[in-house]
Image (cartoon, rainbow, N blue to C red):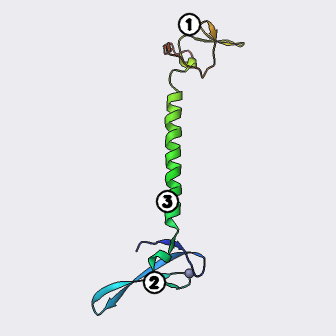
């Protein structure tokens, strides 16, 4: 049976819902919904405070966020000066041979040419 987490109205504990079918003869006429912690019987489903719902929304938000961060960092690793053949580094400066100016390793430009020699 699927466990549904609730915050009980009666005992105010984090609890589970206990569903029992109600039979009239052999026909199921409904369900008795009660708190597994204190046994309080809910007669109206609107009275039940589901815990699961709030938690799901939170998890969804987190997924959304991490997805965006991932896409952003992927773009950032492309066309970086430190991976460019025109990038010259010495103890004093980082220099772009093409633009004849100082650059940062994390800079990028549209004249980017990937470094082919593998002496890193
Ligand atoms: Zn309870």
Q: How far, Cα to Cα, is label 1 from label 3?
A: 52 Å
Task: Indicate which quadrant contains ligand 1.
Answer: bottom right
Query: Where in the figure is residue 4, as x and y percent of width and height?
Result: 47, 71
Residue at 53% of width from left, 50% of height from top?
62
Is 49 above or below relative to 98? below
Query: Where in the figure is residue 35, as x and y percent of width and height?
Result: 51, 81
Q: Residues within 10 Å of mark 1 (few under 14, many from 20)?
A: few
**Residue behind mark 2:** 43
**Residue behind mark 3:** 56
Asked if marks 1 and 3 touch (Cβ < 8 Å), the reply is no
Q: How crowded is mark 2: few (under 14 residues within 10 Å), some or many (20 or more)?
A: few
For numbered disc 3, what is the local secondary structure? helix
Query: Where in the figure is residue 104, as x and y percent of width and height?
Result: 63, 19
Q: How far, Cα to Cα, is label 1 from label 2?
A: 77 Å
Does mark 2 have its CB less than 8 Å from ligand 1? no
The residue nearer to you, when weighing 46 against 16, is 46
* Outermost residue to the right: 92
Residue at 53% of width from left, 33% of height from top?
73
Whichever of labels 1 and 2 marks the residue nearer the N terminus, that label is 2
**Residue behind mark 1:** 98
- Foreground disc of the pair 1, 2: 2
Is 2 above or below relative to 30? above
Image label count: 3
The residue nearer to you, when weighing 75 against 47, is 47
- Foreground disc of the pair 2, 3: 2
Residue at 53% of width from left, 15% of height from top?
84
Residue at 52% of width from left, 34% of height from top?
72
Query: Where in the figure is residue 85, as x and y percent of width and height?
Result: 53, 12
Is 80 above or below relative to 9? above
Q: Quadrant of the C terminus?
A: top right
């Amino acid at each position: 049976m699927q466990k549904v987490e609730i915050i009980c109205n009666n005992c105010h504990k984090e609890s589970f819902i206990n569903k029992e079918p109600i039979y009239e003869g052999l026909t199921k006429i409904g369900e008795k919904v009660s708190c597994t912690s204190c046994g309080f019987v809910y007669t109206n489903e609107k009275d039940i405070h589901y815990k699961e719902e709030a938690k799901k929304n939170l998890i969804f938000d987190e997924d959304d966020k991490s997805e965006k961060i991932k896409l952003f960092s992927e773009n950032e690793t492309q066309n970086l000066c430190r991976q460019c053949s025109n990038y010259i580094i010495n103890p004093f400066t980082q220099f772009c041979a093409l633009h004849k100016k100082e650059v940062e390793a994390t800079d990028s430009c549209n004249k980017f040419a990937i470094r082919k020699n593998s002496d890193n």
